[in-house]
Image: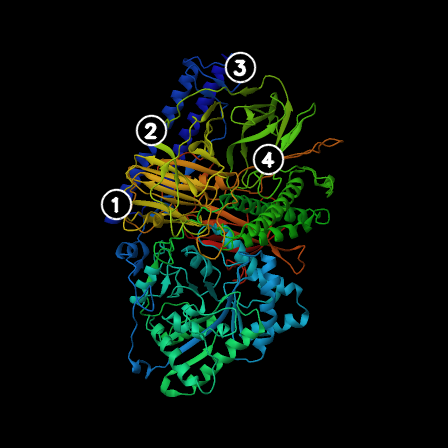
Amino acid sequence: MKLKKQVTVCGGAIFCVAVFSLYLMLDRVQHDPARRQSAGNFPRSQISVLQNRIEQLEQLLEENHQIISHIKDSVLELTDTGAISPSGHLPFRSANGSWVLPFDGRPTFLSVKPLDCQFALGRRSQTDLQMLDVYSLLSFDNVDGGVWKQGFEITYEPNEWDDEPLQVFVVPHSHNDPGWIKTFDKYYNDQTQHIFNNLVVKLAEDPRRKFIWSEISFFAKWWESADVHKQEAMRKLILSGQLEMVTGGWVMTDEANAHYSAMIDQLIEGHQWLEKNLGKTGPHSGWAVDPFGHSATMPYLLKRANMSSMLIQRVHYSIKKHFAATRSLEFMWRQAWDIESGTDMFCHMMPFYSYDVPHTCGPDPKICCQFDFKRLPGSRVNCPWKVPPRAITDANVAERAGVLLDQYRKKSKLFRSKVLLVPLGDDFRYDKALEWDQQYFNYQKLFDYMNSHPEMHVKAQFATLTDYFNAVYKAKGVAPGTRPPDYPVLSGDFFTYADREDHYWSGYYTSRPFYKNMDRVLESHLRGAEILYSLAVAHARRAGLEGRYPVSDYYLLTDARRNIGLFQHHDAITGTAKEAVVIDYGNRLLRSLVGLKRVIINAAHFLVIKNKDIYRFYQTEPFLETDDRRATQDSLPQRTLIELESTPRYLVLFNPVEQERLCVVTMLVNSARVRVLTEDGQTLPVQLSAQWVSAVEMSGEVYQASFMARLPALGLAVFHLVRAYGVGTLCPCDRRRIRRKDDPQEVRVQIQFLTYGTRPSKDKSGAYLFLPDGNAKPYSQREAPVVRVVEGPLFSEVVAHYQHFQQTVRVHNVPGIDGLSLDITSMVDMRDQNNKELAMRLVTDIQSGDTFYTDLNGFQIQPRRYFQKLPLQANFYPMPAMAYIQDSRYRLTLHTAQALGVSSLASGQLEVILDRRLMQDDNRGLGQGLKDNKRTANRFRLLLERRSNSGKPGDSRPVSFPSLLSHMTSTILNHEVLALPVLPRKHGVPPMHTFAPLAGTLPCDFHLLNLRSIQSRDAHFPSPYTALLLHRLGLDCGLEAQNPGFNCTTTQGQLSISGLFRGLDLQLLQPMSLSLMHSQPPLSNDSSVNLEPMEISAYKLKLC
């Protein structure tokens, strides 16, 4: 009877909340100025708006009626079906077999303003080139083009330059991979340091000499070991314009697998290093000659970092040919959502096969190779075309200059200006003083001859990349970064890359998935550590305790920023380095992970202590334990075991998400008798599960204890664990069916596992290439899999053990984000396989046709199309964060916690490659196969959403957006709650309290990318300033909204920073460029900032 009364009261309370919510909606419609119509006669447009508002109100009324009906049904079910706990405890199983949980008494609501939904529905910019259309247009026939094998014959008239001479800008460069065949350190010691040492001397010999450099990771290492005289000489070369830093990231980042947050972090790290050591010297131009395909995210990030131009190289040879034929190799690269031109970035696409010298002077590599003077007779490097270079002398300079000019002229015919870019370099070039002399002396003789003969109508010189771009802008009469009048506008991306024949580089989307997953774990830890450290230091300063707090943890953040930045290199996260190099990357990542956990537990310790006066930090006596540990760089994490004794244990949970979070937390305990209490003593329901040591054997000493926790945004919550009797629910093995309760229609979703082999002869799959032996074959094994079903009040799961993988599918029985998608983990171990690739295929009855959607870098969605005219491997694309298919009724999204390759090879299907084991090299320079596979956990969330009646999928549009629920699902998947046990102490644990850093709620279409402490002159300590990076998400509101489990509102992009952080005052609010190098005038401290949908913005704050 007591429970019946409690349920009735709870139901009545929910009913009152629902009615009050309806009242607020009505009140908002009546009083919101945006909704209120002016007096007098209504124009037709306003009548239409009013009609739409009435329809929305009717929909709201219907939704509230349904909510109240559900509440009524729930109350009746609890009171009339015998749902009475025999013991009076919750949770318990009702008469109909469902679990009854305690009512979570905090009402939540979802309120997305209609204007915040218009962005996804609005008009799109009209571009001249949309890459999906280009793919539809091209035949991809690979016709032999003669000397330019992948192109066509180029002709010109000799008098074409009589009125306007050809300007030739030769740009010497050296591409240095921070790890590939050798480790980062070995490359530096063997080659890169010698490039810098020679550069300082050789550029100073002649002011006409120029050079460009990209990878700041190498440059910083040289700088730190150089004496003050070398540093000053290098600084002088940069200030004079002889040496230019291009892009200026820590590495030349991969653009397929890298997450945009990590791409930004490594760009900030490079630019912050440049600013600290060289001042605000740029960079002005982007340079990406080696990433294996190019993402539309990159021009946006470079634009936000105040760059005006960029260059790309590795693009499908058929696209290069098409762009060359239409003179579209230079274009304004615009984001697909941009309705005007605010995101436009001037982009130069190199036209030929490679960035080496034979493929950069013109269309004929046999001739261009003769002008790579490192290959002079006697060198260890020669020309494959059997015609070696000749040193330039007075006797041959006229003939040699004429031959070279012919190539320059032919190449210039592919562009719309009479300004020509000619890169001069290759991998690790200029490491010997001899090569500097060979290249610069011989080319200077050629330039001098050309420039002194007016009849040749050419002006040739050494240049930097920005020298070239500025000359193009000047020739076209526009400001830097501005669209020249006749240049095309392009939107889309350049995946999947093929360099010849049907050799598509789609294998590296999955290669070495263990490290792709480890990278994402590190990124989440880095962001969490940055946020907690910044907040802890600010609160310590405010309390006058800066001297007690371990502020020197900053060097651990710097180390992690640089190691994670290093791993974004296009031969690291891609999985395309030698095995020894992969181990070196792994050791760096593990070291940083340990350091980041230390930063997190030190910050959490300070922030949860209730009385700061008693706070003391001892390096040798940590207050908290880490949530898990990795024994080695290639092992999976092992959860920390919490040993329950007679005294209570305490647990601190960190929520790295910027919204309040209602979720299931699982920990390992040594007792089946465990009780969990909140900070204020409320008992929480606990689900106990067995800890399995094998497919069929349970541990008798360790148990999984799961409980539902509500955690503050970006905050820390404290829980008590005590040993008790009869309070847990130990879940039996039981088979039950799981289906959506709110939809009578069923969507068939079948999970299949398949394998691909590789071709039996000639070219085979390797680290880069995916060259399958045909369609995938169903995975099979002789014995039937062991299947385990666990069913309980908080979650239920099915675990299937196969020979080469273990598949776990879990559904959470909690309100909010956690309970709205399936949690899938594929534990893969292919170490006994040869030349096999394991795929997971989702087969549904969604009528998706040939269209599917993949994300670019977790930042934006790119529509894709399956093309039958392309080979199977060409239809795979990178999936760093999600992919989905949809029709007029449903959308099915596969969210991922690691970058993998994905495709949709038939209507209603999504297919993801889980791992690859390949026994041979694929002839792209690595010299190894992929034989160092690890036991790898691939983690996913599968989300099924129903499209509302008013929503249309818009498959024909060149842009698409995730729903708000989809964004949040991706966020919780990639930013797990960290469970930090408090270590037992002899004298007891001091009082602790919840730390909730935000004074209010962040609009739920805002993602807090980072709260990063900014560097000072001292490498071990930060400055008083903090960088706040915000991203406003683009939303598709055409999918039915679900209760997220927290209060979710949008504000049309408005956010007040001054009142954002509880207990801290804002003393500076200054807009910055994305990489923090360039500043705008400060705003008043009480100003609100305004972000457009999809916008990423950075601000410098001073919090105290």
User: Disc 1 and disc 4: Cα gap in Å?
Assistant: 60 Å
- The residue to which callout 4 is attached is 638
Horizontal and vertical percent for residue 29?
36, 40
Q: Nearer the viewer, mark 3 or mark 4?
A: 4
Mark 1 vs 4, N-terminal side: 1
Q: Secondary structure at mark 4?
A: strand
| The label number, if any, that marks residue 845 in the structure image | none
- The residue to which callout 1 is attached is 48
- The residue to which callout 3 is attached is 88
The disc labelled 1 sits on which kind of residue? Answer: Ser
The disc labelled 3 sits on which kind of residue? Answer: Gly
Instruction: Report the front residue among 185 and 852.
Output: 185
The disc labelled 2 sits on which kind of residue? Answer: Asp
Q: Secondary structure at mark 1?
A: helix
Mark 3 vs 4, N-terminal side: 3
| The label number, if any, that marks residue 743 in the structure image | 2
User: What scheme was used to colour the molecule?
Assistant: rainbow
